[in-house]
Image (tube, rainbow, N blue to C red):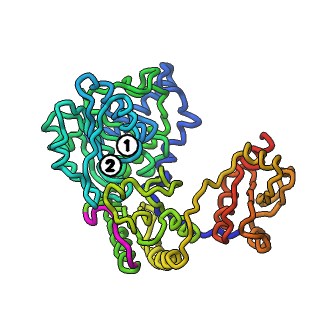
């Protein structure tokens, strides 16, 4: 089976790990693998690697190395900031200010704190997603302990007036946290100059691996840990440090700082060409977010009369990978909470598309998208289809239950060769390269289960091929033949 070259335009969701970062990490898996809390020689070498990584990051961010706390993600950094301040400051006050367009890791943490008796005020935003700063100034009270806001919005790309936010909040003596996960890849950030008390960052937004983030905590900021254990990370985040990923994150941050100016200029050129091409060639399209103050890689739209989630699926059939908002909420058909808060007209609300560029995109990618997208949207408007974006993976347990009940399942073993020779009873061996011819006689409503050896690469690809051909009742068996046979 021939698969199309993928064009990846979802860099706000995650980025590819850079080759240089992988190289910097590699020796920490097989050679320098000791626990950095151990006091023998290998442990001290690992500790040195963690502290050097911390020092390199602090040098870029303009802060002290002791103010850098490694976490498992940007979401964990946000949780640590909000919960840590709430617990440390709960005796002084129980009022927190945030906005309705924040990442779910902030909004859901605030909801959890409300259940514990804290009061949360949500700032008003305009249609471009800019904070109402007059509302912010008026919302701060004597019992306000924390303001937590996003630096750049992940769904619509709007960059906030951070200087004015800092001026308002700090003049009232209130702690300030910025979710800067989307800011670090594109802006020069100096912690001393910005003046916030806490800032969250994530590795996989700037070509480091997933599973590593960091929290800047200004010296003297009251913060209690919410992960307890061996007192790592200055007692604020217990758990054995992830040495290779911390090293990889530091390498990515240093490279990003070195290349940022040229990188941003390249992105701005591609972004503006992309926005202009779409608005000129597609009727009833509106840009979301601030048209000027926005991330340099970020182009987001709403299209009238189109379901954004299904648009993403259609684009995927052409090898174009984008999103309809935050990756955290992509399986659902609910309208984006960000777009709702911005007051996007109902006719456009469900038609969101987020296109985010990265270092591996080119003019060719932008031109191809501008050529293809108008036809896809015109086709979707002419042939309205209902939302269909159910999870494609079927558990081994559910699969066995369906086998017992005698449900008519067409089980296709799509491994290129029958090795190992064993097969699931009742399955048919149809290698992926034969699928196109095999399904010609199959009814589109047939319930199909795809099986490869482990279920992680071949089956999902063939699922997308069948979906493009109109088969919408296809599942991929989790774990594949290996899971079925217990190996």
Give the label on residue 107, or none: 1
- x then y, percent, for residue 313: 55, 65
In the picture, which quadrant includes the N terminus?
Answer: bottom right
User: Outermost residue, left direction?
Assistant: 171
Give the answer, above or below, for where 347 lies relative to 137.
below
Front position in the image: 186 or 122: 122
Give the residue at x 41% y 78%: 282
- x then y, percent, for residue 329: 48, 52
Give the residue at x 46% y 24%: 44
Q: Main secondary structure of the magenta part?
A: loop
Front position in the image: 248 or 68: 68
The residue singled out by tag 2 in the image is 100
Mark 1: few/some/many CA within 10 Å (<14, 14-19, 20+)? many
User: Outermost residue, front direction?
Assistant: 346
Give the residue at x 41% y 28%: 237
Number of numbered markers:
2
Q: Is residue 284 magenta?
A: yes
Q: Earlier in the sequence, mark 1 or mark 2?
A: 2
Specify start and end residues of the magenta stretch as a single range: 283-292
The secondary structure type at the circle numbered 2 is loop
Give the label on residue 308, or none: none
Give the residue at x 53% y 36%: 28
Q: On the rendered structure, is 366 left or right of 388?
A: left
Q: Are marks 1 and 2 in contact (CB under 8 Å)?
A: yes
């Amino acid at each position: 089976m021939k698969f199309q070259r993928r064009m990846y335009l979802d860099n706000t969701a995650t980025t590819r790990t850079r080759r240089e970062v992988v190289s910097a990490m590699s020796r920490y898996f097989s050679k320098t693998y000791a626990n950095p809390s151990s006091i023998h020689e290998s442990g001290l070498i690992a500790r040195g690697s963690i502290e050097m990584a911390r020092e390199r990051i602090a040098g870029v961010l303009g802060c002290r190395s002791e103010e850098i706390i490694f976490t498992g993600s940007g979401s964990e950094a946000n949780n640590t900031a909000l919960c840590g301040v709430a617990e440390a400051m709960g005796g002084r006050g129980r009022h927190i200010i945030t906005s309705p367009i924040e990442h779910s890791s902030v909004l859901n943490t605030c909801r959890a704190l409300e259940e514990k008796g804290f009061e949360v005020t949500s700032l008003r935003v305009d249609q471009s997603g800019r904070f109402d700063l007059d509302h912010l100034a008026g919302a701060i009270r004597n019992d306000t302990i924390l303001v937590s806001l996003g630096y750049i919005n992940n769904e619509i790309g709007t960059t906030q007036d951070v200087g004015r936010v800092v001026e308002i909040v700090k003049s009232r003596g209130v702690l300030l946290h910025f979710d800067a996960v989307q800011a670090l890849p594109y802006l020069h950030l100096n912690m001393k100059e910005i003046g916030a008390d806490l800032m969250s960052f994530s590795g996989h937004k700037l070509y480091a691996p997933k599973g590593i983030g960091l929290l800047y905590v200004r010296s003297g900021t009251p913060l209690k840990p919410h992960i307890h254990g061996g007192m790592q990370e200055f007692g604020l985040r217990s758990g054995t440090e992830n040495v290779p990923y911390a090293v990889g994150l530091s390498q990515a941050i240093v490279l990003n700082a070195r290349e940022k100016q040229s990188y941003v200029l390249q992105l701005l050129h591609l972004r503006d060409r992309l926005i202009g091409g779409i608005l000129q060639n597609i009727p009833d399209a509106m840009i979301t977010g601030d048209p000027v103050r926005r991330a340099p890689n970020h182009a987001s739209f709403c299209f009238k009369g189109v379901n954004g989630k299904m648009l993403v699926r259609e684009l995927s059939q052409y090898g174009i990978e984008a999103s309809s908002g935050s990756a955290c909420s992509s399986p659902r058909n609910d309208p984006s909470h960000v777009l709702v808060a911005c007051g996007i007209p109902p006719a456009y609300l469900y038609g969101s598309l987020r296109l985010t560029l990265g270092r591996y995109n080119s003019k060719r990618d932008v031109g191809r998208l501008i050529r293809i997208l108008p036809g896809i949207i015109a086709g979707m408007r002419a042939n309205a289809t209902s939302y269909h974006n159910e999870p494609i993976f079927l558990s081994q347990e559910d699969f066995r239950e369906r086998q017992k009940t005698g449900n008519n399942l067409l089980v296709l073993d799509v491994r290129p060769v029958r090795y190992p020779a064993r097969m699931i009873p009742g399955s048919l061996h149809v290698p992926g390269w034969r699928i196109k011819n095999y399904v010609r006689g199959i009814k589109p409503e047939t319930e199909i289960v795809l099986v490869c050896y482990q279920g992680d690469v071949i089956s999902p690809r063939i699922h997308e091929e069948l979906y493009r051909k109109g088969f919408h009742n296809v599942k991929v068996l989790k774990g594949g033949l290996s899971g079925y046979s217990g190996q």
